[in-house]
Image (spheres, helix red, strand yellow):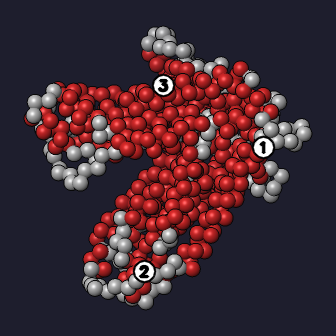
Amino acid sequence: MSEGPLTSASTSKIANSKKPASKTRIEVRVIYASLILIFTAFLALPLGGLFVRAFTDGSTGELGLGNFSQVLAHPDFLTSLGNSFLVSALAGVITTTLAFILAYGVNMARLPKWLERTIPIVIAIPALFPTITYGFAIIYTFGRQGVATELLGGHQLFEIYGINGLLLGYVIYTLPIAYLLIDNGFRYIDKRFFIVSRIMGDGGIKAFARAVLYPMIGTIGAAFVQSFALSFADFGIPAAVAGRFQVLSRTLFDTMLGAVPSFELGAVVAIAMLLPSVMSVVILTWLDRFTINYKKFTPVTLRKHKLRDTCFSVYAIALLLAMVSIFAVVFIVPFTAQWPWDRSLSIDPIINTFSDAQYQMIASNSLIFALATAVIGTILTFFAALIARRGNLPKRIAGSIDTFSIVTNSVPGMVMGVAYLLFFVGTPMQNTLFILIACSVIHLFSTPYLMFSGAFARMNKSWELTAELMGDNWFKTLRRILVPNVLPTVFEVFGYFFIYTMVTISGVIFLVSAHTALLTTRITQLSYFARFEEIFVLSLGIFIINLAMRIMTKYAARKAQTRLQGE
């Protein structure tokens, strides 16, 4: 047997070789048992401890509802809860609308090819920055001395602190994921139905409603829910532009790390942050009934329509320029002597920042943290998806891994961070990089797991059986067949873990110490001293690192895919 990866062509040579399904391998059982231990130690127990702490009286140690009564009786909590629901819902509506129009133009109009290729690249740019940078970019763009304000002759377009700044930040933050969801949904819409509807005499609005809007209800709903949940749970943007507009993430931070911290009351607030997660699962389950599956797709080339195509092209360009222009200050401020008073070109802010030994340590921490999370996370999600999809496990047992994935996706980063803080306090893990890595791996588990699950599901189901008939053991099959055929996904997952770990702040804000400080948490500290030059230097550093990683992993994934198709 050759050393190259097994492909469909090679397996087709082995015909009529049938063997009853083998029992679950001992290797698969060991991996599953290890996953159970990991999720018990780093998910179930911390979350369970969070709930116990919420029901425990801090003075007497007795269980009861006193903490809940105390939190609910505080007017600031109800105000912040209501504000969070309001601003997150508004952001969800705006984001979903903007994303839908953009995705509609890409899929239902004939945009220039260069624009179609540019949209996925540009719309992913915000993901390369920590969310707290969004807020400071908004301040330096639309503030009283902002770039946009000066271009308008000193006229400030809107008050940036409070609900306006939050809405703008949340829309920028959630637009990429909403667009990706809706754009992917459009790929499962058969355009023939729209064309036939028009031929049958339906007006544009009626044809749109029947052939596009109705089949997309589930996807549109999912985009709204995702945008709402991400906005509700974010801490970075409120930390920069919330002002006196109190939201729940700020309330949780103040309760846990404020002047008079209370872990018991913080646990209650953390549980309150789970409300959108529970609502999301219920809503997404309900929306699933609207999913329409077409048995067959026929490629359709839309005819050119000058007015339609021009309008959607202008919209796409305007939206992308508006989004990117807000981050322009991140690339300007680090190269000026002292913005906004001395705007002469200078690289002194960059040199002064990264020549500081403390910043070198923090940058080193962030890189080690991101690389370790990417390595461990990739390995964990690979084996989890492997045994769930190709481990010959009973359906109920394999489904339990999917359940873990749903839970990790539903718990906000701040809630996970609080749970880890309360559960691991006083243990050897406290104030170490390991606790940050464990928290991030579990928090980011869902999406990489689904990526690997999809890759394994698309593989020929007979490959392992063929390898077994050829005398390969499980590890040899893994090395020669399974890994090579999902190698493109390995690179994609590694990049995902690395980039999102570099920009994370919500989950780690409660867990860092002086020795494990990260670039994102340092940016949060600098905001209290209004040291914006350093903030933008660090943000630019994070962006460059993430951009380099994205380019490398995309290139590696593309090369692996090309090599795989050529063998």
Q: Quadrant of residue 135?
A: top right
Q: Residue at x 62, y 70 (%)?
A: 33
Mark 3 secondary-structure assignment: helix
Q: Position of residue 437 (x, y in %)?
A: 65, 55
Earlier in the chain: of badge 1 and badge 2, it is 2
Q: Which residue is mark 2?
A: 21
Q: State which quarter of the image contains the N terminus.
A: bottom left
Q: Which residue is mark 1?
A: 53
Amino acid bearing label 3 = Leu
Alpha-carbon distance for marks 1 and 2? 47 Å
Amino acid bearing label 1 = Arg
For the residue pair 561 and 450, the one nearer the viewer reads as: 450
Q: Position of residue 452 (x, y in %)?
A: 45, 61
For the residue pair 195 and 309, the one nearer the viewer reads as: 195
Earlier in the chain: of badge 2 and badge 3, it is 2
Q: Residue at x 57, y 63 (%)?
A: 380
The answer to whether one can see residue 235 in this image is yes
Q: Are marks 3 and 1 in contact (CB under 8 Å)?
A: no
* Image position of 283 with respect to 162: above or below: below
**Labels 3, 1: front one:** 1
Alpha-carbon distance for marks 3 and 1? 33 Å
Residue 477, which numbered label? none
**Total numbered labels placed on residues in the image:** 3
Q: Position of residue 74 (x, y in %)?
A: 74, 23
Mark 1 secondary-structure assignment: helix
Q: Residues within 10 Å of mark 2 (few under 14, many from 20)?
A: few
Alpha-carbon distance for marks 2 and 3? 52 Å
Left or right: 498, with 220 as reference point: right
Residue 90, which numbered label? 3
